[in-house]
Amino acid sequence: MSFVKFEDVSKVYKTGSVEIRAVDHISFEIEKGEFCVIVGPSGAGKTTVLNMLGGMDACSGGTITVDGTRVSDMSPRQLTEYRRDDIGFVFQFYNLVGNLTALENVELAAQICKDPLDAATVLAEVGLSDRSDNFPGQLSGGEQQRVAIARALAKNPKLMLCDEPTGALDYQTGKQILKLLQDTCRQKNVTVIVITHNSAITPMADRVIRIKNGTVAEMRLNPDPMPVENIEW
Amino acid sequence: MRALNRDFIREIIKTKGRFLSILVLAALAVAFLSGLRAIAPDMKNTLDDYMDSRNMADLQVYASLGLTEDDIGAMLQQDGITDGEAFYLIDAFASCGETGKPVKLWSMPQRIGLLVIREGRMPENSGECLIDGKYSKEENIHIGDTVTLATEGTYEDCLAVESAEVVGIISSPYYISVERGTSTIGNGQATGCIYMLPEAFDMDYYTTALFKLEGADALVAYSDEYEDLVSDAQDALDVFGEERAAIRTAEIKNEGFDKLAEAQDELDEGKQKLADAETEIADARQELDDGWEELADAKRTLAKETADAEKKIADAEKELADALVELNDGEKEYADGIKEYEDGLADYEDGLKKYEDGVKEYEDGEKKLADAAEELRVGRISIREGQAEINAGKAQIAAGRQQILEQQNMLDGQKAAMAGMGMDADTIAALTDGYQAQIDAGSAALDANEAQLAAAEGQLNAGRAELGYGQQEYDRGVEELEKAKAELDDAKAELDDAKAKLEDAEKELADARTELDDGWKEYNDGVAELEDARKELRDKVRDAEKEIADAEKELSDGEEEYADGYEEYLEKKADADRDIADAEVRIADARQDLLDLKDCEWYITGREAAPGYLGFGQDADRMANLAKVFPMLFFIVAALVCLTTMTRMVDEQRMEIGCLKALGYSKLAISKKYILYGALPAVFGSVFGLAFGYTVFPKMIFTAWQIMYDVPDIKLQSYTNISVFSIAAIIVCTALSSLWACFATLTASPAALMRPKTPTAGKRVFLEYIKPLWNRMNFFRKVTARNLFRYKKRLIMTIAGIGGCAALIIAGFGLRTSLTDTMNNQFGRIFRYTASVSVTDSISEEEEAAVRNYLDGSESVTDYMHGILASGTAESPDYSIFTYIQVGEPEDIARFFEIQTYDERKGPDAGEIITLDDSGVIIDQKLSELLNVGVGDSFTLEFDTRRQVTVAAINEHYVAHYVYMTPAYYSAKYHKPYEPDTYLMKIEPDDDETSDRVMTELLALDGVGAANRVADTKNTYMHSMERIDLVVVVVILAAAALAFVVLFNLSNINITERRRELATIKVLGFRDGEVSAYVYRENMILTLFGIILGLALGHWLHVWLVHTTEIDLMMFGRNTDRMAYVWASVLTVLFSVIVNFAAHFSLKKIDMVESLKSAE
């Protein structure tokens, strides 16, 4: 049974008489524990898909099922709970709370979910235990993103959603982050979905979904994903 | 530039809401400023127009002894006086069915102080009147009703009518407030004013006169120029006034003395009349008495003489009675005599008859004898025989005869004896006749026997007898004949004797008869005389009695008349005595009064004499004071809002600004947009604000004033200076705020601007260094703590805004309690008495004593003191103000006033008791501030004369100014004897009924001039204080507005600024409630700090507000009530909660997707 299932999902923005179909009858499936990369040009609808998947946005049509739960039918309140306990988000621009230290940022997430991991441990896992008392303003981009990942991981989520996690980072740091994500996926059996417009990353994924103009242009499985270190772009 | 302008215009169109919010706030701020500032001049102008349109007086003259036509004429001659009119103005009771209440009764104004007819028409005769609207409403008297008027006391007999029909309802420019002034009758407060034609009054002097000053109309009421004009005129007319007053005094005194002389004459006349009447009565009495005496004498005389006469008559009667007896005896004797005579006569006759019979008999006998002889012869024969028997019988008969003979002899012997004894024939006859008769009878009997014998002898005797008898008879017959003859001869002799005697007796009798007749005649005469005498006596007595009765009746009538006359006299005398006594007293009093008559004094006042005029000006001033403070709040709010709005806008447009800067536009060019964005709505808003402010606010507030004041609708005006100031102020406010908002941004480098704004760097808060506390804080608390200090501007603004709101609420409520405190302290604690009563200058000893007696005797008056309560002016080199002056003995003052020191910080009733002594005066706190004097300093106190007085102590006092001094100090300073003229008293129970009764009773006493109840003063102030409530409401609303606006804006900004952060935590799965709480916690803490700040500031704001709204005549309590703090906290928290609640919805609306969108 697929872990994540999009069935004929659409997202339409209506402004007056103009209809913008951000996502147009998309259907795909993702298995548990997979490292999935959703790739497509800017404005293709990738972020929209991620948002709907992450319960941040409602779909205009179709059904979204995650681990058996009909996410598309959930009320906002239920979605909040869903986000709280089951989803870990990583943003392109980190979105850490600047007023909290790295550890506190992770704790922020940990303190509200049902079954968290210990914040300090997770932070250590991302290799930032010695930066735990620093404010985001005092951290570099990569460190910030790592904190963001730690924050997402601390929630012990079913699903990790990453929206262009390396977008604001340089090549090396980017790779580090991707490696972290891959390791998390492999070691903790967390389903990781990464949105990117950088097709060069796709070899590292178990599944690649190519989205174009709001539809799935291509979905292929990768039986033999490449380790991140080997990817060049 | 063009593109930039287009951008600007589009910005406005795009963010209409923001633009409009600034516009509206600017409009409000300007409206408040211009509106509140315009009220005072509008009010004064409106009143000035009203006064001018009704040609209201500038000066009022009141003379204590009245004004004459000459006075008016002379006054009109004075410089600066353009017109004048004199009025009758009296205190009277007016009623329409119910009990009368004191009113002010005026004669109709013809030129000055014209009335405004609201309903009805002007009166056409003295039986019609006009009444004022307030009076009409309160007493429910309407056109067509008849009002009954009555006067007493000073103005007794000043009215020519007793009632008047209401023909119109008016407003008077003299009475612009609800007050109608004090009255000398009733309970001392006039309830209304009534206007009547001069003909309705019966007075020979005017009470007051109103005058107009040259140039006064052109000036505005209450303005300095106007006040100066009036006070200059007053000063200039001082001397003139004194002169006129002196003239009046002389006039009155002369008139008075003339009248006294007249009265005295009349009195003397009257006395004389009374004396005459007395004399008349005395004379009448005397006459009557004499009459009675005379009558008594007459009665006595009558009685006496009657008695005498009666006695005489009685005697006469007795005499007559005796005579009668005598006569009767005589008659009886006579009658006896007659009888005797007649008996004798009868005897004689008998005798005669007998004699004749005897003769006859003799003759018969003779005959018989003859016969007998014959018979005898005859018979003898026969008889002889019988004789024997008959002889026996005859012997018997002879014996009998012998007897008879013997008897006869006896009789004859007796007769002879009798004759020998001297008895008269009558007597003898009388005596013997009987016997004779007996004898005769015996003889007869014998005869009979003889007859019998004879009869018997009839036979014999008839024969014998007859013979014997016959013989006898014959013999006897012969004898008898002889005897008989003898007898007859004796008898004859006797008869002749008897006859002679009888004739004698007859003669005697006749004499006796004559005597008797004479006697009877005399007697009858006597009786007749007596009868006459009696009759005479009766008549005379009757006449005399009649006379006496008449005389008595006359006297009785006379007495009745006298009695009636006397009664009348007594009655009238009693009255006359009374009247005379009264008149004497009155004359004496009048003389004393005249001698005591205080010289006429002229009082020249300005419009302040009209009740309510001063108050109106003060109310306008109070509005002006408020206008200084209040609008500032709105300006602050407007500035704050502008600041925050602009800040937000600038933040939002950072990138654009960066762009423009990069493009090379100057700071000025860029900032122009924002400055204009702030200033432009301010300008448009001002226009609306001015329009609104000049029309709505004055009208609104004045409508409230019109409840208290009977003046025309407000005349709205715009004031250039106010307008310019307002517009300038708001533009500066907004422009500066905008400039400040964009300053930081403008100075930053373009590159920095174009980058997304670095989230403010996290910083450790000082709290973290307090490790024990920090470690114990729960995670979210730590977040809150850090967040609090992260946004400093927000922190400051929130705390300031909340603080301001709380402070305002405290000030607002505080102001309210200040006022009630003022009233409660002043009238409940500081003034310890219920009422005051002042006596006139001309009060006499007895009248004064009567007042004291009343006060001593009244159950309701529990305590009283005697002192002076006057008014004067307290002056310092550059300030002067009206003040009361209370002179009294320290012990009295201490009982009637609570005088203690005052410390503003400690508040009311927290000082030490000050005892008045001779070292100086005690003045109140506010006065010392106004005059800028402290203990030991001196100031000028004008009170008849100007003197320097020294401050001995400063006390707590709130309403009006009071200067206390001892009588000794007074005398020493003012060089006048201490003549107390005011009684302060405590009345229990302190309710309307008891106080009214005491006031009325006191005012009814002679010599009592005015009465005032402290409660009434309190009410007057309370009424004006009530208007302050309006102010308080405005304050509270302003506070609320401030809180809301600030909080709302800040809250919004806060949310906007942290949108990303908030979206993130939403994504993280924070529930809506948790997201809100994330923000609330901070708000709440800020609010808490804000309240604490506000509570701290509140008291100062309160004091400041009090200082600015206070008028010089009062000191409001400066103590802030605890409840104000409670209210402030509660309300502020309430506002916060409401704002936060609104924010919740904003937070909910944060779209995670949008908010997290990168700046692409």
Image (tube, helix red, strand yellow):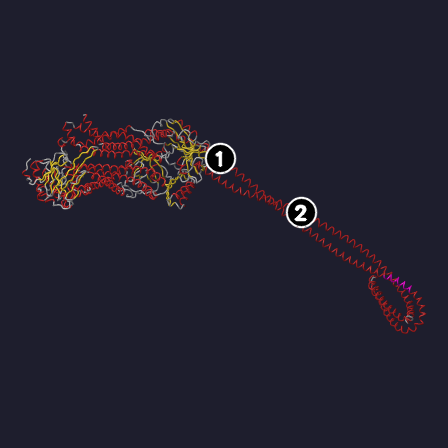
Q: Main secondary structure of the magenta part?
A: helix
* Nearer to us: label 1 or label 2: 2
Residue closest to the eye, B957 or B386: B386
Q: Which residue is mark 2?
A: B544
The percent coordinates of residue B1044 (x first, y second) are 24, 38
Q: Is residue B379 left or right of residue B794?
A: right
Q: Does residue B121 show up magenta in the picture?
A: no
At mark 1, the secondary structure is helix
Asked if residue B249 shows in the view, the reply is no
Within 10 angstroms of label 1, few (less than 14), some, or many (20 or more) residues? some
Q: Residue furthest left?
A: A230
Disc 1: host chain: B
Q: Which residue is mark 1?
A: B261
Distance in Å between CA atoms under marks 1 and 2:
60 Å
**For marks 1 and 2 on the same chain, the one whose residue lies earlier in the sequence:** 1
At mark 2, the secondary structure is helix
- Which residue type does callout 2 highlight? Ala
Disc 2: host chain: B
The percent coordinates of residue B418 (x first, y second) are 83, 64
Q: Does residue B354 show up magenta in the picture?
A: yes
- Which residue type does callout 1 highlight? Ala
Instruction: Give the image quarter of residue B222.
Output: top left
Q: Are marks 1 and 2 in contact (CB under 8 Å)?
A: no
The percent coordinates of residue B1029 (x first, y second) are 31, 38
Q: Is residue A144 left or right of residue B830?
A: left
Image: B393 above or below B149: below
Query: For the magenta stretch, what is the residue range?
Result: B350-364
Residue closest to the eye, B97 or B680: B680
